[in-house]
Amino acid sequence: MDAHPDLNKPFGGNTVEEHKPKRPIFTPVVLILLTFSLIGNVFLYSRSIQHDKDARISRGTSILQSGNDAKLYFDQVTSGIEDLLKHQDIPTRLAAKSLLIAAYHKSSAITTFIKEAEAVNGTPFPETTRNAATFLEQSEKSLQTLGNHTGPLTDEERIYLKSLLAVNQACAAEMATFKHDTISETTSLTILVDEKWVNSAKKLVESMNKPANVMFGK
């Protein structure tokens, strides 16, 4: 006698396929997106840090360059005025004046140095009479005007030059403390936390404001 047919088998003898639940694709996709988002955020954060570092290096380099140029400027102008006071005849005096006026080509470093210091200071330095740019402009114009005559310098010219010399000597002495000959990433970053040069810039402004008048003949 035939065995009873297996009632669990489907008609036709095919076995029933077990339907396994499909894994949701939502979770892996979210993980992938989160991973890419994290990588992107890290990249942007790294770029932001690098940009900030580059900006600080650039600013520090500007301070170092302008400080060294300002130091050289005051040394040259001081030497030039001393030399001008020594010459009694017009040919040698005009030659001395030419070298002295040439030093003024570096005068923009003074204003840059002071502006950088004021930015670090948070407020502009007090100006009782004039700012640095005015002092430099008026003194240069005065040097171009005086001494263009035969014979020795007049008493008025000598008094003016000695007054201008005193200001530049004070500034040169102050900038002598600025000893940052090497410019690198490290020194550019270090100068930003050094307060000594900021005080030096402030004293430059004070010295430039001491004379009652900087224009010769007025």
Image (spheres, grey):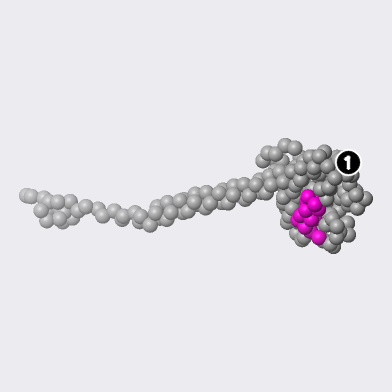
Specify the amino acid type for callout 1.
Gln
Percent of width and height locating residue 210: 88, 56
Quarter of the image containing the C terminus? bottom right
**Relative to residue 217, is residue 170 depicted above or below?**
above
Question: Which residue ends up furthest to the top in the rendered image?
Answer: 182
Percent of width and height locating residue 196: 81, 48
Q: Which of the two residues, 32 or 148, is positioned nearer the viewer here?
A: 148
Write the residue at 59% across / 49% down: 51
Write the residue at 52% across / 49% down: 43
Find disc 1 in the rendering and name its residue: 88
Asked whether the viewer can see residue 76, the reply is no
Q: Is residue 193 left or right of residue 53?
A: right
Q: Main secondary structure of the magenta part?
A: helix
Q: Is residue 34 left or right of residue 142?
A: left
Percent of width and height locating residue 91: 81, 39
Query: Which secondary structure, mark 1?
Result: loop
Q: Which of the two residues, 104 or 108, is positioned nearer the viewer here?
A: 104
**Relative to residue 92, is residue 166 depicted above or below?**
below
Q: Please identify the quarter of the rendering in which residue 30 is found.
A: bottom left
